[in-house]
Amino acid sequence: MDTKMNTKNKKRKFRKPGKHWREGMTIIDLFDMFPDDETAERWFEHMRWGEGGPACPECGSCRYAVVKNRKPMPYRCKDCRKHFSVRKGTVMESSKIGLRKWAIAIYAFLTNLKGVSSMKLHRDLGIRQSSAWHMLQRIREAFDEGELKFCGPVEVDETYIGGKEANKHASKKLHVGGGTQGKAAVLGVKERETGRVIARPLGWEPGETLAGFVRENVETGETVYTDGHKGYNRLKDDYEHEAVQHSVGEYVNGQAHTNGIESFWAMLKRGYHGTYHKMSYKHLHRYVNEFAGKHNIRKLDTCDQMAYVVEKMDNKRLRYRDLIG
């Protein structure tokens, strides 16, 4: 008995936490890596352009001249004659915030699994709260993956984001009843083999339905596991559809369950309740992209995650007036 207990205690003692193989980055490492804006700029350039050096975002030419006084930008294309920098053509375009602060913001965004609020970022970086909010929304924009198609068995489920109707101010009440009424529905698909997730608020595309969302993101003929929602009944013609009936207490039936996608919803809800407290429908898709994006790269080392975000920033721009308009 004592031998068994000792063996059990040893296993507990040396048990490693989840994702222990990942190479993280301490705050000390972060500030050593980015001591100033010049070092941060070189890092961003290397992450965006690689060993080949700068390339013009306008015409793609690698023929450039260095502008000594860096005005209006540090490089000038010899072909189209336009000035450019590592910011141009990315979500950082026209930002007056230093690149060192951008690197720190990306680190904070990625390492806080439940999200980082604009109030905290504004205090940590010494910038205005509105600037911190705009910065975070632009980083979320980098996680917009566009269209993806999953293969193999997938789990599909929906969740609801928003406050209870009874707790809303009188001017905000929709008078549509309790429960999920008055909340925004978010749909998600999780590919079992890779663990990747696609999620989007329902109705973000005109005329979107539960079945339509699945057809858009899952290859025809694959196995789809859902709950007993009637909206999934239309999948039977195009997919191997199996469902579990949560309404009668059935949560697992052989391979049929939605536990994987529900664990993703749990993290999204922790961010909603614990960090952001409110996600307006206007910007909800960006918050959902944030959690789906971080989930999909969670196995990468921290430095590789930062490089991934910089790569995804290319060919995207989100101006403040467009964000609030």
Image: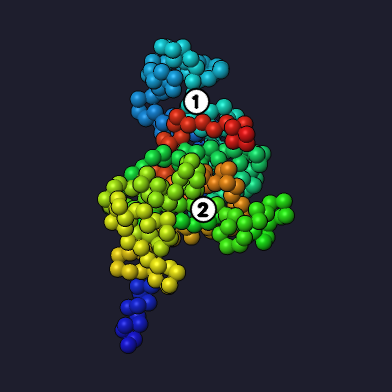
Q: Which residue is mark 2?
A: 185
Residue situated furthest bottom in the rendering: 1
Mark toward the viewer: 2 or 1: 2
Residue situated furthest right in the rendering: 170
Instruction: Classify mark 2: helix, strand or loop.
Output: strand
Kind of residue indicated by mark 2: Ala
- Height in image: 176 above or below 99? below
Kind of residue indicated by mark 1: Lys
Q: Nearer the viewer, residue 166 or 269?
A: 166
Residue 312 placement (x, y as % from top left): 43, 36
Instruction: Classify mark 1: helix, strand or loop.
Output: loop
Q: Nearer the viewer, residue 152 or 304?
A: 152
Question: Which residue: 57% across, 54% down?
Answer: 183
Question: Which residue: 44% across, 31% down?
Answer: 314
Tag 2–tag 1 contact (CB < 8 Å): no
Q: Nearer the viewer, residue 6 or 203?
A: 203
Q: Which residue is mark 1?
A: 88
**In the picture, which quadrant includes the C terminus?**
top right
Q: Nearer the viewer, residue 46 or 114?
A: 114
Residue 1 placement (x, y as % from top left): 32, 88
Few, some or many residues within 10 Å of mark 2 (<14, 14–19, 20+):
some
Question: Which residue: 37% across, 30% down?
Answer: 50
Residue 255 placement (x, y as % from top left): 30, 65
